[in-house]
Amino acid sequence: MARKTTEDSYSGKAFPFTEARIAAARLAARPEDADAHGRRSWGDSGCTGLKLVVNVNTGSAAFYYQGKVNGRGIRRALGDVEVVSLIEARAAVNRLRYDRSTAGLLAPRADEAGDDGKQSPILAGVVDDMLAAHAAGRWLPGRRRRQGPPTERTMKFYEDLRNATTKTHEDMTLQEFAHKLPDIYAKLQAKAPVQANRALQLWRNIFTFATDSGLWSGPNPAVATSGTSRMTKTPELPRQRVLTDAEWKRLEKAMAADQPVWRDLFTLSIRSLQRMGACCRARWSDITLTAKDAAWRIPAADMKGRAGGHTIPLTAMPDVVSMLKERRKLVPKDCPWVFPAIEGDGPVESYKSAWQRLLKAAKLWSEDKDRRPRPHDLRRTGGSRMVTAGVPLNVVTRALGDAQSSVSMVAKTYAVVADAALHDAFAAARVQATRRHRP
């Protein structure tokens, strides 16, 4: 009898899991055997309900629990094989199978203590510890490998999100919160789906931190995908709002009649394609206005993601150079900021009231938030102009200061057809139609 090859050994739907066989199965996973999502799965013939799921494109693998309760399918992620051992995965499956049995309903296991008998910590303390560790740079969520602690803006985002979505539940123990999480998420998602997406990521980070700190064992409840407690993010479409040429002319007219600081600030954003945060924090020490060397060198600390600094070649924008030279005359010589705050020693930070005033003056204000132009739309407008001009997407991505891996995102967000290009397209179609109907 011919001996089975390694690939033949894993051609079926199940095999008895061992650490060595799991490693071999990952190597044997072939694209032609994968599902529509590029995943190949096997069941553990030694533990009913335990599944191994391999992504054939990346080679990553994770354990899942899959079974039925009252005729309804249950599927829950247990964790990556690099994080959760086979022994831990089987123990988790046995626990889940017991909890969903009649015996588990009649005599549930203690929820307030883990297998080691320790009391489950209060959620508020865990969140406090996570945010403190993150602010100090001792712990980073996800797989990010940034240097140094996060910015104050990032930490404020986490605090605001915590207060809006989690604070009212923080008197619970971590175990209680895990049990009630599907219901908490469902209520928030029905009311504010985008905020629910952000909250779900926060909760995933909380339980990941708790696991890393030895405060939580078992699967992360914030990544549950079972039929009864599905917690998946609501799809978010990228905003594609750009200012038309007519809208920008009206806004320019309104800015010309307002304070020069706002005209210059918003003009710098649309011309340099940079975020408002970077424009507000622009320093004279980072700007060279000499004709042949004119450039704005933005430090990594002012760039989103902080993967590295970014340079804007001002030699290609003489009008911006002229604008900055005029600003240099208006700003005191000892002030380091291009746009100093009206009060205080720092840079300008609050520009929302000025933006609202300008929109109303330009008759661009709308009660519909989606239709109303936002300051960030200036960056998108500048980027879409580049795309319309035929600049390759990878070059536009670099001009924006984004990572080259973001080209697909740039295509979705910035490849917006400007009104002038749309006019030319219809005109070209009319000319072509006229030629075809000539005798």
Image (spheres, helix red, strand yellow):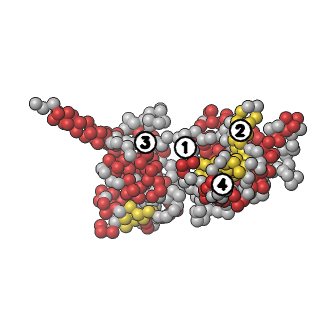
N-terminal of the pair, mark 1 or mark 2, is 1
Q: Quadrant of the N terminus?
A: bottom right
Residue holding disc 4: 9
In the rendered image, is residue 36 in sight? yes
Residue 260 in the image: x percent, y percent? 37, 51
Residue holding disc 2: 74
Residue holding disc 1: 36
Which numbered mark, 1 or 4, is in the foreground of this view? Answer: 4
**Based on the displayed image, in which of its 4 quarters is residue 326 positioned?**
bottom left
From mark 1 to mark 2, how far is it between C-alphas?
20 Å
Q: Callout 2, which amino acid?
A: Ile
Question: In terms of depth relative to the viewer, which is nearer, 326 or 251?
Answer: 251
Looking at the image, the residue that sits furthest to the left is 439
Q: Callout 1, which amino acid?
A: Ala
Residue holding disc 3: 240
Residue 335 in the image: x percent, y percent? 46, 64
Residue, x 77% and y 54% (percent of image)?
Answer: 88
N-terminal of the pair, mark 2 or mark 4, is 4
Q: SS for tag 4?
A: helix
Which numbered mark, 1 or 3, is in the foreground of this view? Answer: 1
Q: Callout 4, which amino acid?
A: Ser
N-terminal of the pair, mark 1 or mark 4, is 4
From mark 2 to mark 4, how far is it between C-alphas?
27 Å
Which numbered mark, 1 or 2, is in the foreground of this view? Answer: 1
